[in-house]
Amino acid sequence: MTNTQLTRRAFLSSASSAAKSSIIVLSLPAILVSCERSKQAILNNEEFSLLTEEEAQEFNAIAARIIPTDETPGATEAGVIYFIDNVLSDNREEEHETLRLGLRELQIAAALNFNASYFHELEPEQQDQLLTEAEDTPFFGTIRFLTIAGMFSLPEYGGNRDKIGYELIGFEDRHAWQPPYGSYDADYAERGE
């Protein structure tokens, strides 16, 4: 890893602040269910459950600027867009509509500032400029939260494809961290339970 690794405390603080500005709040079980659905969608090359192709392209481009691909894989490689699709398709029509309106405003800004019809058509610097301007909106806060949740969720449930998120924060997924944890469980382990 490079010297840009986050400390665990800094990562958790950043993730916590992302959740505060989101219009969607997810519990751990909701994240796990969405990850399982997104894993199946990725494995089966399924169409999106709720997002239109345009929304998927645009949200994917936004997620790719939030956690970009550089010397390490980013949100695109982690399949974050499938996670976002599954969260929104879980009876979140009101939140989806808020994101649609925010996306429309972002597209209008792209047209006015850069004469482009779509956000994903812009150069990365132009995308960053527009996202910086939208940084304090519920739209951006929600997309940021969903991107982070999809990037760092459990790999076996579909998020964090190939443990990309774990590698990014320097988390080592070791067998030793699975139960039984210590000598107090030694008899349990010896019995094969």
Image (cartoon, rainbow, N blue to C red):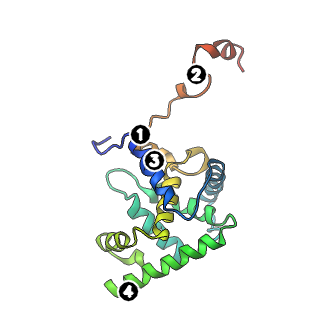
Q: Pointers 4 and 1 in contact (CB under 8 A)?
A: no
- Distance Cα–Cα, label 1 vs label 3: 13 Å
The disc at residue 165 is 3
* 110 vs 80: above or below: below
- At label 2, the amino acid type is Tyr
Among the two numbered marks 4 and 1 on one chain, the one whose residue lies closer to the N terminus: 1
Mark 1 / mark 3, whichever is N-terminal? 1
Q: CA distance from mark 4 to mark 3?
A: 33 Å
Question: Pointer 3: residues within 10 angstroms few (<14), some, or many (20+)?
Answer: many
According to the picture, the residue beneath numbered tag 4 turns out to be: 111
Mark in front: 3 vs 2: 2
Q: Amino acid at mark 4?
A: Ala
* Residue 112 on image: x %, y %: 35, 87
Residue highlighted by disc 1: 8
Establish if 55 lies above or below 67. below
User: Dot 1, how many residues are within 10 Å of its Cα: few (below 14), some (14-19), or many (20+)?
Assistant: few
Task: First in sequence, mark 1 or 2: give its number.
Answer: 1
Ranked by sequence position, the earlier of labels 4 and 3 is 4
Find numbered disc 2 in the image and state the secondary structure of the residue it sits on: loop
Q: CA distance from mark 1 to mark 2?
A: 21 Å
Q: Position of residue 82 (x, y in %)?
A: 57, 61
Front disc: 4 or 1: 1
Q: CA distance from mark 3 to mark 2?
A: 24 Å
